[in-house]
Amino acid sequence: MVIVFDEKGQMHTLEGVAAATIMLLVIVYAIDATSMTPLTSSTANVHVETELQVLGQDILGSLDYAEPGYNSNLTNDILGWNGKEYIWDGTSYMEKGNASYSQNNLTNNLTNSLKYTLIKQGIAHSVELTFLANDGTSLVTQKMIDNGNPSDNAVIVSRKIALHNSDHPNASNIQLTDIDPSTDLYNIVDVKLILWRM
Amino acid sequence: MGIIENERAQFMLLAGFIIAIGLVITTVMLNNIIFESNMAGEAGGDPIKYDLVNLMSISGDEMKSAYRNVTAPGQNPALKVSNFTKQMQNFNGNLSLIYALHGECVNLSWDISNWNTTRYANFTENGTANGARNWTIIENVKDSNITVNVTTISPPFNISINSSTKSWQINFTAPQNITINSAQIIANVSVTPYTISFMNGANVSGRFNITGNTSNNKPFIRARDHILNTTILFSTSDTRANITIPVSVPW
């Protein structure tokens, strides 16, 4: 057997490695150059979601503050809600399916806060309320503000609120009922604020 | 002149080139890892903390509400503990259902021994013996009625009412039950608005009730009989918390 001392094979291997490296660099550059939107799934998207979550919690937290002897603004909004659904039409939260009458628009502490925060920043949002049905075991979910289907990257923040008979909840909301007639406890409401970037 | 066919220099150049490119790639990737772990990983908030703060808040509020309901005028004093317990039990059961929606397990328990044994709260900021001794109850008061029932005392203790021009110190040296109305306060501090503070509140225990209006005509109430305790057991698939919080009742 004769061993052939030929360096061409080694050379071709090295050239192949160099070519592969250059191609890898091109791919990395191309990926970096691709535009990243807030909805693009990435670690940056996690950052955006975290910002939305903190913003949502701050909105609900500031509305849920109450000093002794008073209900929080958020509690008052839930107590006064008539159970109807509203949508943002660009200027106000109008009643869904009955937008002709401006007196039907929803105006309360929550909508005022949403106008000055989420609307100004162009953040889409919906508000859902989940509470117990009067059978005491099943849960009912009602939409207060509905701005369409959230994206896959939507964030949900929530706040639980206890309502009492002595707070005189709005009787127009026939689904939000007294789950405990034997005591002052009326119902427990989970207020969910859903936020997403368009 | 003969040409020497030697490819060693070409090999060395190519090897150097590959090593240089490899270093660049390694540096870029390392940089990306550090950047992303700082940006996204550390920025991620812990949503559980919001749930816990909310849970502590509504549990305390419900305890205050139940206490106020059963001690309100017209309620049967003999049934106060059983009615209190009934409301809290119903609240606990329903709250568990709401939290189960989020995959969270919640259970409340409560300790009303201070109420049962008529052990009144200290006049500190949080009502416990080691709370802030000197604290302001309310500022910018236009008119107020103060009722203080001191049951145990180790002087000094005084209520300090301060306006922009005068200061009135109401000193306590022995257990007593006093009521101070708005006219008395104005006579001693001359002008409104004024500030009401407790000084050396850790030296005394009892009950107080202060009602009135602030300088912008907003009614207020500050009152405390007892400090009750509620224990919150909160658990998720990866978090477990057992928190006991003091709750000032009725407000």
Image (cartoon, grey):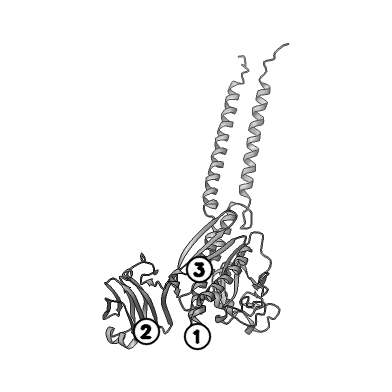
> Which amino acid lies under the numbered mark 2 shown in the image of this protein?
Asn
In the picture as drawn, the residue positioned furthest to the front comes out as B78
The kind of residue on which mark 1 rests is Gly
Disc with the residue nearer the chain's start (3 vs 2): 3
Mark positioned earlier in the residue sequence (2 or 1): 1
Which of the 4 quarters of the picture holds residue A25?
top right
The answer to whether dots 3 and 1 both sit on one chain is yes
**Label 1: element kind:** loop
Of tags 2 and 1, which is closer to the observer?
A: 1
Residue A117: percent from the left, percent from the top?
54, 69
Residue at point 54% right, 48% down?
Answer: B37
Picture residue at 73% right of the left edge, 11% below the top: A1
Label 3 vs label 1: CA separation?
Answer: 28 Å
For badge 3, the amino acid type reads Ser
The reply to whether dot 2 and dot 1 touch (C-beta < 8 Å) is no
Q: Which is nearer the N-term, disc 3 or disc 1? A: 3
Labels 3 and 2 positioned on one and the same chain: yes
The chain carrying label 3 is B
- Figure check: B102 above or below B29: below
Residue at the location (68% across, 77% down)?
A96
**Position of A122 relative to B43 (above/below):** below
Mark 1 highlights which residue? Answer: B74
Up the image or down, B18 lies above or below A164; here it is above
Q: Secondary structure at mark 2?
A: strand
**Is residue A141 or residue B228 the one in the foreground?**
B228
Q: Which residue is mark 3?
A: B57
Among the 4 quarters of the image, the one containing residue B207: bottom left
Q: Are marks 3 and 2 in contact (CB under 8 Å)?
A: no
Q: Which residue is mark 2?
A: B145
Q: For the residue labelled by badge 3, is the local secondary structure a helix, a strand or a loop?
A: helix
